[in-house]
Amino acid sequence: MTTTLPVDEKKDSYDVIGKNPLRHDGTDKVTGRAQYGADIRLPGMLYGAMVRSSHAHARILSIDTSQAEAYPGVRAVVTAKDLPDVESKIAELGEGTINLRHQSNNVLAKDKVLYFGHAVAAVAAINVHIAEAAAALIEVEYEVLPPVLDVRKAMQADSAILLDDMRTDELGKKGDVPSNVAAHYQIQTGDLEKGFQDASVIVEREFFTSMVHQGYIEPQNATAQYNPDGQITIWCSTQGSFGVREQTAEILEMPVSKIRVVPMEIGGGFGGKVGVYLEPVVVLLSRKSGYRPVKMTMTRSDVLAATGPTSGSYIKVKMGANREGKITAVQALLAYEAGAYPGSPVGGGMGVMFAPYRIENALVDGYDVLVNKPRTAAYRAPGGSNAAFACETMVDELCEKLGMDPIEFRLLNGAREGDRRVDGPTFARIGFLETLEAAQKSSHYCGPLEGPNRSHRGRGVASGFWYNYGGKSSASASVNSDGTVSLITGSVDIGGTRTSVAMQLAEGLGIPAESIHPAVVDTDSVGYTEGTYGSRTTFSTGWAAYEVSKLLKEKLLERAALIWETQPDKIRFEHGRFLFDDKQMTFAQLASRLDETGGPVVASAAVRPERSAPTFATHIVDVEVDPETGKVQILRYTAVQDAGKAIYPDYVASQMQGGVAQGVGWALNEEYLYDEQGRLVNASLLDYRMPVTLDLPMIETVIVEVPNPGHPYGVRGVGEVPIVPPPAALANAIYHAIGVRMTTLPMTPARIVAELNKQEG
Amino acid sequence: MTKRVRVQATINGEEAEFLCEPRQSLLEVLRETLGLTGAKEGCNNGNCGACNVILDGALVNSCLVLAVEINGRRVTTIEGIATAQGLHPLQEKFIVHAALQCGFCTPGFIVAAKALLDQNPNPSETEIRGWLAGNLCRCTGYDRIVRAVMDAAQVQDGIL
């Protein structure tokens, strides 16, 4: 069930926004006709297979590809020797940055393999079976090195070192000895000592989380066709086609104009399909095979072993509050696993951690730490869930010690407009308190805690924050003679954004969403557009569509003025009708007269908002824990979230529900399991246990609308924050069910039984 | 090159004939040989359900069936669910209930739900959740999928 609570004082007068039209690509997607990356088949196409490291940490001594090259049906073999030696250069990559040399080495390992599954060589052959058989014949000689698998051990001076040239960036100053600590960041404000002196209650704990994967159902795939004239086309599953173009161009040292990226339909991303893996490799294979198109698709075990995941972490938190329940001081240390190359989302975690609260005295230290695991990628609110798991569990403990209701405590301490976030920025209009009030009034929070058994039931509450990104987007549109408008954007549609963007164009033109024909096109066919990440597409690309609507309207008013022999400013345009004196024309009537008034009407716009506005969520969950087996059953779940203005409410609610489901998996089941040699032992969807239908109840959603004053329609961005509260909400519910504070994710049955046994023992 | 085998089967109501290697899965042949790319490869080992098809009335993961096994049998893929009259109620309800985001798992869910409704026209929420537990969706949290199937069952019930 979805409830929408508008907080906006002026009543909406929208024709299209806030309704739920049928999505434009619905029929394609329910009939199997939508073309995803792996569905492509080109004449003469070859199939690729990758050779991957079976060691977590080893020096590559030699690679012998001769047997594979001689294998019948093989057309090309490539290794890192085929890649140019890319210099260190930092590139923006969605919600993070990456050093392009590291990116190149991650695509094909050069001197060392740094994780189990690290790509070493690739083969293209006439079918995938031959490619796989030939790949198995490639002999790689390794000098095996000790694997570094624990984030805290990796930070010690005597640890084996992953990258010999890595020096710690210590608060902006480079260290002088090799280290696995890529960076140490710090946030400091107020007087910590005094803050803790003022506290009458202080809580302190350590928290541990494992790496988890984005878990998109579609494996990474890429197809490239290298033309003899040097022009390259890449078809792939990506969140951002322009990002693929840039990264591939940098890694292969060629101009971006040589590469056209065609984004196919994408089967989920969640941040994991921003960086390239296969794209530069298939380009090399295509060239080396005599310009044949080459397709490569990852296996599921490749996806788990070598893409994603997000960081595992060690977090220590200390929080103090006075007798009235006001937070007086907070301190935290966050050490995040970056994986094989620097770039964990520890910075995101540091900022998210205490953002929901008004805090005067704080000290937060963050460490970005290399370990012999895959290079981490963004995952929905990167870094946020780890940090909120720790902070929101401590908030619950403070409430318990103070004897306060968890929502009352948050209402007392909650951030509001004008408050300064611990990490610096001052909040403009935000909706945290509104989500808390809505949660407090919800039928769930007001209702009884009910389950099939009478004991071991608990209710948990947790909140979360996310920044929301803005960024560059372009859109173009043309008016058709039948009164429809064709809209083209470069924003890959992962969850209904064709429609949420089209609705903003439709609103501006006063025509139904169904009259817009949205298309997502390749990098040669639309202006620069950043990827679908950072909860930015409905915000930024929607804004570009709004700008396009204004331009089209201007041009159409000129046409109407020609017809009525008057000035454009004498004509009113209301809800899709042009009005002048007692005359009127519908949008469609005018559209049918473009030929006689000067020809086609088209418009393009590009926007570049630096950022969107932050959003907050508060979640309530009821659980029942089986004390015999440790299994946690979720009885009821309600997610409350400030969406700004919800353009396409069904899909806003669906983002909230999907974020909850991923958060539940992270909280209860999902984790990367490595053996002592650093081999991933659960690289299948049977052993990497994501939630299925039976693990979840219906997920209730309450959309709170506190419009973002920085967007023409008040959009904030909705995709990411719903994954932030679930682990803590569940940990708190489990505590209230069985009296044990779970401080390690996932909270598996085995861990819960172990804690219960400790309690009894 | 491995020797190929000739296979004849009825696919989406039409006679089909193809050559395949004995090691090729039904999923691979559907996608690569027959161009029926609606069945998706999510895991290739029976854990995600994205490749679901109906084989002689039974729901199967086409990645776990060898193509040679379908000789003389009837296969329904997602491409065979809609009819000349239009979308199947399940397809309509998936759109109406916003039961998809990325849409990659959707063909598998619709085929699986069709197999359920074919044998149990009026399933409870628990029965739907139990039946669909072999299909992974990472986008929606399943809420809307379950609702779409319940609603489609009612519509279909009305038609029958």
Image (spheres, coloured by chain):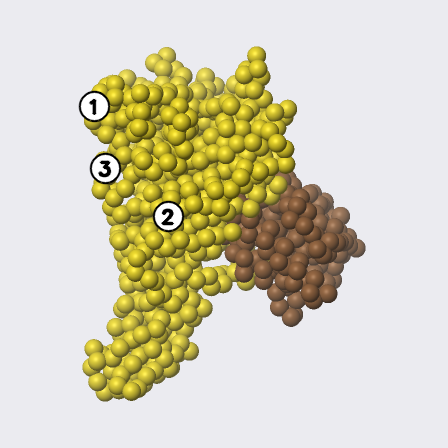
User: What is the spatial separation of the Cα atoms under label 3 and label 2, in whole angstroms?
Assistant: 19 Å
Nearer the N terminus, badge 3 or badge 1? 1
Quickly name the residue at label 3: A420
User: Among the chains, which one is brown?
Assistant: B
Amino acid carrying label 1: it is: Asp
Is disc 1 on the same chain as disc 3? yes
In three-dimensional space, the C-alpha distance between marks 1 and 2, rounded to whole angstroms, equals 32 Å
Closer-to-camera residue (A579/A704): A704
Give the x, y percent position of residue A206.
41, 21
The chain holding disc 2 is A
**Earlier residue among tags 3 and 2:** 3
Say what amino acid the circle numbered 3 marks: Arg
Name the residue that disc number 2 marks. Answer: A642
Q: Which residue is mark 1?
A: A191
Task: Give x and y (percent) for residue B56.
Answer: 76, 53
Q: Nearer the viewer, residue A506 or A734?
A: A734
* Mark 1 touches mark 2? (CB < 8 Å): no
User: Looking at the rendering, which quadrant does residue A57 occupy?
Assistant: top left
User: What amino acid is at disc 2?
Assistant: Asp
Q: Position of residue A133 (x, y in %)?
A: 60, 37
| SS of the residue under disc 3 | loop
Q: Image point 44% across, 20% down: which residue?
A: A150
Mark 3 closeness class: few <14, some 14–19, many ≥20 residues within 10 Å:
some
Chain A shade? yellow
Q: Secondary structure at mark 2?
A: strand
